[in-house]
Image: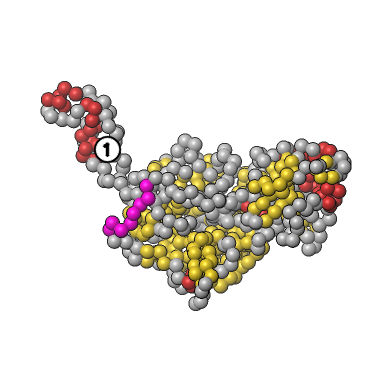
Amino acid sequence: MIGRRACWGLGGLVMAMAGCGPAPAPQAADKPRAEAAAQATGAPGTAGAAGPSSTGGASSAAGGVKADEATKPAPPPESAFTPVAQIPEDLEIRLHPVEGALLVSTPNLTVVEGEQTNVATAVGVLKDGKIDFPERLRVPGWMVTVSGVHGRYPDQLDLIATGTTGRTGVAEHYALGAKGWDQRVGDAGQWFTGVARMGSSLVGLTGPTMIGRSRFVTLRGPRVGLTITPAPRKGECRGFDAEAASRYSEAEVRPEAFGATRDGTALSYGRNCNGDNAVEVWKPGEKRSTILPVPAPSEEQTTDEVRTLILPGPGDGEAWIVDRGVLRYQGGEAKKIDPPAKGARVLTASAAPDGTLWALTDDALFTRKGDAWEQAPLPDGVKARDVAVGSDGAVWVAAGGAILKHGGASEAAGAAPGTIQLQKGPPPKPRENRTLPRPGGPKCPQNLVVLYTFSKTAPDDYDFPLTRKALKGRTEFSPARFVVTRDMGQRFLAAFVPTWDLAKKLEERIKTDVRGSTPQIVCATPEVVRELKLDLKTGEVAK
């Protein structure tokens, strides 16, 4: 997701950062006085907002609280989270609790090598109140985004990430060796949608950043052979294999998140060929799957800053499906649950060993174990940037320029009291988040047909003669808006189209008339760098 998606604009065309999430911030609050709150409300032993006094005269006579003071709201509830380490303000941090340590990852660690200054992706470890970034844990490659780290520190770790070739994303798996990370998988055009523990094996599922086949990858342990259901041969989910020059069926459910329940049931969540939400389910011991339609977790269409995840639920056969909203998979079906607060969207989440869900929204942190949400207060004035729960039940939060901790079997060595300065107010504005685009469909608010990928040597004013030839005389495409877009330094010729039917017709026209082309319809609104005004009657560029 990991999930949704490693985070992107036109996103997956360049790479899918399975998990890039938002970057909000924390701050310490004074302890609320339960006695004072109780006295103000007239309810012994309770804290809350004080109501109007109905015994003002008696209170005054007894020298009690004045009426105007009694109406003041109670102090905010005390937070159970404790700051344990400071975070450098300029680092974008993601949390990765593993056995034996809390690890963090950042895509923007500045390192000096000789006279050269570079920005590197690195993994750090919490130790004695500080985050240490040893050179051994620096991730090789360029513009790599870490989705997850799994295993035991310091001798048995697997790292899942998305890199880039400059043109497309790369699904990457590394295992930690004596000298650093050893790459085991590097699939161009793919990204890891998630990782699941299945028996003694660690299994990942890759999906295409734009086109390609999904596949299971056994990262550690005995190979797990599961079969992905292909789309119907006559359906809309058809890909084009340029090397074999043939069409093939993509997955019936194009994966956006992958995970497993406690009993080993594997789940892949995404969209089917019609653009509807669906989940593919592999029960323990079964290689073939069943596909279930599921409701949309949220009515919101945007995916920026949001991770799509599948997390173990409270029961053996249960799971949480997180995609802006939350579904609860239970008893072979998935049901939508109410959001943590009215209108709130879930940015990311993590599940405790007992299945308790910790969910981060734009404004607050919430927890849910049974049938109700509860807000988990953070130190006053801070907003969370990430949340993750370890195998010992410790809940870790990145907020306010610090790492906060609550619970857990063992206490991490924190910084000396008073040395951590929590940042009040809004967090630093995060860098641009990039979200892997969803496949286009009838329900997409803006379908984009990606027609052509620029080569690195193509001039800025390239006018696409083959595409113009294919569209000459095709005035039915006049409602389309042809543009040059840019994403992560890569340029594309694309067309915004007003309807799904017109998008499909344009895709098919280019596939048929421009040999070797692989246009794709995605649901995205990328940066536009140039308008291409085509006269469809003549096939020329309008002046």
Is 514 above or below relative to 184? above
Tell me what residue is drawn at x 61 percent, y 49 percent: 9
Left or right, residue 245 beside residue 14: right
Q: Does the segment drawn in magenta span residue 181?
A: no
Q: Quadrant of the N terminus?
A: bottom right
In percent of width and height, residue 498 lies at 72, 37
Q: Is residue 393 visible?
A: no
Tell me what residue is drawn at x 50 percent, y 47 percent: 347
Q: So how many labels did they put on this image?
A: 1
In percent of width and height, residue 335 lies at 54, 42
Tell me what residue is drawn at x 52 percent, y 43 percent: 325
Mark 1 is surrounded, within 10 Å at the Cα level, by few (under 14), some (14 to 19) or many (20 or more) other residues, namely many
Colouring of the image:
secondary structure
Q: Nearer the viewer, residue 192 or 363?
A: 363
Instruction: Classify mark 1: helix, strand or loop.
Output: loop
In percent of width and height, residue 289 lies at 63, 54
For disc 1, the marked residue is 47
Q: Does the segment drawn in magenta span residue 419?
A: yes
Q: Is residue 463 visible?
A: yes
Q: Quadrant of the C terminus?
A: top right
> To which quarter of the image does residue 152 belong?
bottom left
Q: Residue furthest left?
A: 62
Instruction: Magenta stretch: give its range.
Output: 417-424
